[in-house]
Image (cartoon, grey):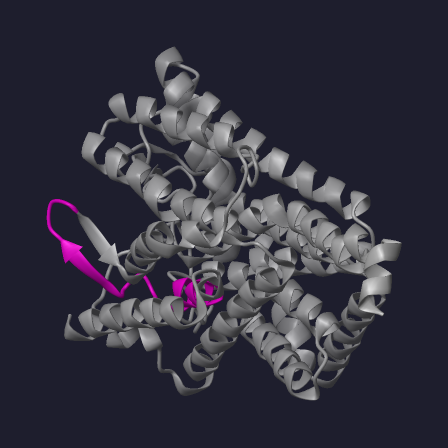
Amino acid sequence: MPLVIALDVLVVVLLCASNLMRGFEETLPLAAFLVLVFPNECQIPLPGLFDLTTQRVIIVTLFILYLWSGKKQRTQSPGENSLPLKYLIILQIAWMLLATLNSVVFSVSFKTVLSQLLDYYLAFYIFGKSVTSVKTVNKILMGFVAAMFLCSVFGALEAYKGWSIISIFPPTTHLIGGAPGADTDRGVRVQATFGHAILFGSALAMAIPMALYLLAQAKTAKRKVFLWGAVLLMFLNLYKTDSRGPWLAAVIGLAMLAVFGGGLMRRYVIIIALLAATTLIVRPGVWESISNLYGATLDPESPQGESYQWRYALYQVGFQHLNHDSARALWGYGPESFGYLGWQGTFDVGDFKGKLVTFDSCDSSIAQLMIETGYVGLLIVVLMLFKVGVITLRNCFRLAKPANQLCVVLLANICAFCFMMTNVAIFGWGQQTYMFWLIVAIAMIYPRLIREEAVYDEKKATPSPALTSPRVKTSLA
């Protein structure tokens, strides 16, 4: 506990000092770095209330600084800097509150709604309202990459030295785990400061495209060396997570960069592909481990196959209960209620054939949203994510090169996260969700930043009419 308190004090001091010395907007990249590096174990339990995580300390401190100085640093006309998702966010929170009123665990659901609103949507709001330049956007992305580089250092220590940074914090429980056959025979799966190896891998799958984008923008040899080192170390950690979903998510992101990215990013993806192919040839054990894992996934008799089939079983048990209760089909059983439902059913896979299994783990955000907030709640989230994806995709084609290259990277991140929502309970908790909502905030405001900078450059390049009049020219002469 003293360590957690000391770290909380440290982050508050760092954020306040940065705000005083450099201004609020320049503090945002530091905040982006900090929300990723601290584990969920870094928290102060407040019995009967909530857990005061370091991430919450960061967001609360950032909000106070925003109210104190952030709003003063930007004057804007009515309607300017509006966030396109605000109505869907309001609708989702309202529906979650309705689901909470009918929840089987009211207090748990109510805390979950507050967490969604004050943790993630507040961070989305602060960043969406405060970022005023593309330069700040690049710094925020560098904050993400630096954080994932540090986490990858911890991950390498975990993989090769057997020491986890999480071990210095008080133990706590996480939302992931409990599916039949999960993690029983894969050995060490690195997770760094994240709640699970899959979550760590998901964050890496989003950070790697960011690093390649920044590498394409880098001007100095020092920055290029750091970013290449970060990319290689992140790939090592991605492999060491031994997680199928994040591997596929990374492939999806890199494929999008290869197809839609600019020349430099496409070249970097090719280099990475060649390095990966060389590694598989030189180290055949790497290919064998990957091949065996995916082969086991298709074998329902293996632990990996049981874990994979568990996702489909979640949908089946969800449909079974929702379709027989029209009220629950609308608003579900309440946010974060799945672990309290105690549903049982047959799981005819592997060693569990014919046995009654308790569904105590929901390893799919899609299934979880459907069960906990009903079909309507799931539809609202799908519409929100669909709108984010469509806007970002449209900007990939509307913005001129090279400005649109960031949109390609952001779209790759969004697609990777949405893909992982089908694989794991990733939505609504953990560092990777902070990362996702800050990415969404950047994606929503980025076109406006490009327009404002273009107008500024045009005004700067156009001489003032007063200076171009003959009288002024004569006077100046």
Is residue 254 shown above or below 278? above
Asked whether residue 145 appears in the rendered view, the answer is: yes
Asked whether residue 185 appears in the rendered view, the answer is: no
Residue 239: x and y, percent?
A: 58, 71
Residue 451: in magenta span: no
Of residues 448 and 441, the one nearer the viewer is 448
Residue at 80% x, 58% y: name it: 467
Residue 227: x and y, percent?
A: 63, 78
**287 left or right, relative to 164:** right
Where does the N terminus fall, quadrant-wise? bottom left
Residue at 46% x, 35% y: name it: 367
Residue 36: in magenta span: yes
Of residues 82 and 260, the one nearer the viewer is 82
Q: Quadrant of residue 331?
A: top left
**376 left or right, relative to 52:** right
Is residue 178 shown above or below 159? above
Q: How many tags in the picture?
A: 0
Residue at 27% x, 34% y: name it: 109
Give the magenta range.
29-49
Residue most extreme to the top: 326
Of residues 335 and 447, the one nearer the viewer is 447
